Image: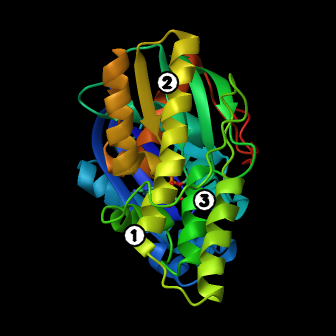
Amino acid sequence: MLILAIESSCDDTAAAVLEPNDHLLSSVISSQNEIHARFGGIVPELASRRHIEMIRPVIDEALLQAGVQLADIDLIAATQGPGLVGSLLVGFTFAKALALVRGLPCVGVDHLAGHLLSCLLEPDKPEFPYTALIVSGGNTSLYAVKDPVTYTRLGRTRDDAAGEAFDKVAKLLDLGYPGGPVISQIAVDGDPAAIAFPRAWLGEDSLDFSFSGLKTSVVNHVNTKRRTNQTLDLADICASFQEAVVTVLVRKTLAAASQTGHTRIVLGGGVAANPRLRTLMQQHCAEKGLKLFTPSPVFCTDNAAMIAVAGYHQFLRGDRIDPDTDAYSRSPLN
Ligand code: KG4
C-alpha cells in the first residue's frame, strides 16, 4: 500500500509518499519563508497564491523522489485543519479532486494529529501511550496519546503560542521571520539569566500556558532601552527570552507526565526544533527516568510525512471523507 499525503495548512506546501509501518519514501517541502520574511509574518493571501503555484510541482517531485507514479497510490491523506483556510483549501481540495478522479479513498487529517505522531517517522519510535508537547507557531498544547488515533488534551495556551511569541519578539528586534531559528542562534552567545523576564505558571496544578505577558515584558524592556538611547544587548535579550519560554514548557511537560503516569515524552511542532528546549527537556527527563522522543528538525516543522502517518492510522480506523467535506480553521483537538 502507498499513501500520498498533502499538507498546506500555513506557509509550506508539502507532499510525501509513505508505505505502512512508517516507511517514508519521499518528503518534499516548498517553503515560503522568503515571501513572508519582509512582512515579519505570514500574509495569508500571498500564502494561498503560492500554494496554488506549488501544489502540483511539489506532488510531482514527491512521486518522482519515491520512484512511483500516481497510478501506484492507494490512499490520499490531506491536512483538513487547523490553519489558514485559504491555504488549507488549496491542498485539501487538490487531494479530494485527485481521489475523486482516480477513485481512491481520501482521509482528512488534523494537523495536530500529524505533529502528535511525527516521532513515529524516526528509527527510535515511542510505544504508546505517551505524553506529548506540541509547540508551534499556532499551538502550544499538552496531550495524553493513548494510541495512534486517541488523544486527550491536558492543557493549552490561553493566549499566544510559544512560536508566535518567538516570531513577535523577532519582529520587535527586526530579526525577520520566522523568529524561532534566528533567536535560538543569537541566544547561544547570550546569558539566559541576564534579564528576569516573567514566567507564567498559572497556578500550582495548571497545565495551561500563557506567553503574552512575557512578550509584553520583552516589548517594555526593548522600548525602554530604545527610548533612553541605551544599547540593546541582543544576545542577552534572546537568551533570557528563550529561557523563560523553555523553562515553562519543560516544567509543565514533566508535570503532565506525572499526572498521566507515562514514562515516554514526545515533542512535536516547529518550536520542538529549538536546541535549548531539546537539551533542557532531555536533562530533566533523564533525571526523572523518563524517555524523551524528539523528531528530527525537518519533521518538527510543517511536513506531509507526519500527515501520511496520521492519515494511514485514520484509514485503518475506517475514516473516509467525501468530496463535499470542508476544511476547518480551528482544531477539535485544541
Ligand atoms: O510547526 P510549524 O512549522 O508551523 C506551525 O504549525 O506553526 O512551526 C513554526 C514555528 C514558528 O513560530 C517558528 O518561529 C518556530 O516554529 N520555530 C522555532 C525554531 N524553529 C522554528 N522556535 C524556536 N526555536 C527554533 N529553533
Circle nearer the N terminus (3, 1): 3
Q: Position of residue 110 (x, y in %)?
A: 61, 38
Q: Amino acid at mark 2?
A: Leu
Label 1 Cα crowd, 10 Å radius (few <14 / some 14-19 / many 20+): many
Do callouts 1 and 2 mark residues in contact (Cβ within 8 Å)?
no
Helix or strand or loop: what does disc 1 sit on? helix
Please name the residue that numbered disc 1 is placed on.
Answer: 235
Task: Give the quadrant of the N terminus.
Answer: top left
| Above or below for 86 versus 127 | below
Task: Give the quadrant of the C terminus.
Answer: top right
Q: Which mark is residue 254?
A: 2
Helix or strand or loop: what does disc 2 sit on? helix
Q: Residue 188 lies in what quarter of the image?
A: bottom left
Q: Which mark is residue 58?
A: none
Relative depth, front residue between 280 and 275? 280
How far apart marks 3 and 2 lie (CA) works out to 22 Å
Residue positioned most to the top: 261
Label 3 Cα crowd, 10 Å radius (few <14 / some 14-19 / many 20+): many
- Kindly identify the residue that appears in the image at 61 percent across and 66 percent down: 218
- Kindly identify the residue that appears in the image at 53 percent across and 49 percent down: 244
Please name the residue that numbered disc 3 is placed on.
Answer: 165
Relative depth, front residue between 182 and 234? 234
Circle nearer the N terminus (3, 2): 3
Q: Amino acid at mark 3?
A: Ala
Q: Amino acid at mark 1?
A: Ala
| Above or below for 66 versus 262 | below
Q: Residue 233 lies in what quarter of the image?
A: bottom left
